[in-house]
Image (tube, helix red, strand yellow):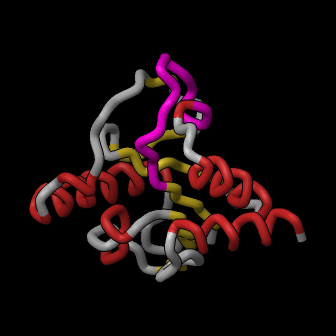
Amino acid sequence: MNKIVLISCASKKLPRKAKASQLYASPLFQLSLRYAKTIHPDAIYILSAKHGLLDLETTIEPYNVTLNEMTTSERKTWAKAVAAQLGKCTNINRDHFVLLAGQNYRSHLTPYLQSFEVPLDGLSIGKQLQYLCGKLSS
């Protein structure tokens, strides 16, 4: 069983093309990525509203798409596509997924995952930042 971290994208982005790991400029995304690396996963991917599943090294242009503005039907379609992408690079039935993602990014995706955890579940953005900072400083 592998440990796979999934981090949701962020609306704050660099104004130019960049690697996915660098494009998202929000403090929450950057802290989530730093935290993800400390738990020594087998892989880290970004959940992108526009691209679906993104490898950290994939170079992309800035975009303005968010699941928060999509209908439930559109989010379900997105989640199904992401699950299919995950199925190509992970063992969706055996791997353990750590979701550092908001409700809209995970609610329709988790039914496809057999084993997962959501460390930031129920926390406001401020509390998520506090949690991550605390984990990174210990």
Q: Is residue 99 left or right of residue 81?
A: right
- Image-quadrant location for residue 71: bottom left
- Which residue is farthest front? 126
Q: Is residue 18 above or below residue 109?
A: above
Residue plotted at (73% across, 52% down): 34
- Counting labels gives 0
- Which residue is farthest top? 16
- Image-quadrant location for residue 80: bottom left
Q: Is residue 53 above or below residue 74?
A: above
Highlighted magenta segment, given as a residue range: 8-22
Q: Is residue 73 above or below residue 62?
A: below
- Which residue is farthest right? 138
Q: 66 or 38, which is in the foreground?
A: 66
Q: Position of residue 61 (x, y in %)?
A: 41, 21
Q: Position of residue 56 (x, y in %)?
A: 58, 38
Residue plotted at (34% across, 38% down): 51
Q: Is residue 111 left or right of residue 58?
A: left
Q: Is residue 93 above or below residue 21?
A: below
Magenta span main SS: loop
Q: Is residue 67 left or right of residue 113?
A: left
Q: Is residue 17 magenta?
A: yes
Q: 105 or 94, which is in the foreground?
A: 105
Q: Quadrant of the N terminus?
A: bottom right
Q: Position of residue 27 (x, y in %)?
A: 62, 49
Residue plotted at (47% across, 82% down): 122
Q: Quadrant of the C terminus?
A: bottom right
Residue plotted at (64% across, 47% down): 30
Q: Position of residue 86 (x, y in %)?
A: 41, 55
Q: 113 or 125, which is in the foreground?
A: 125
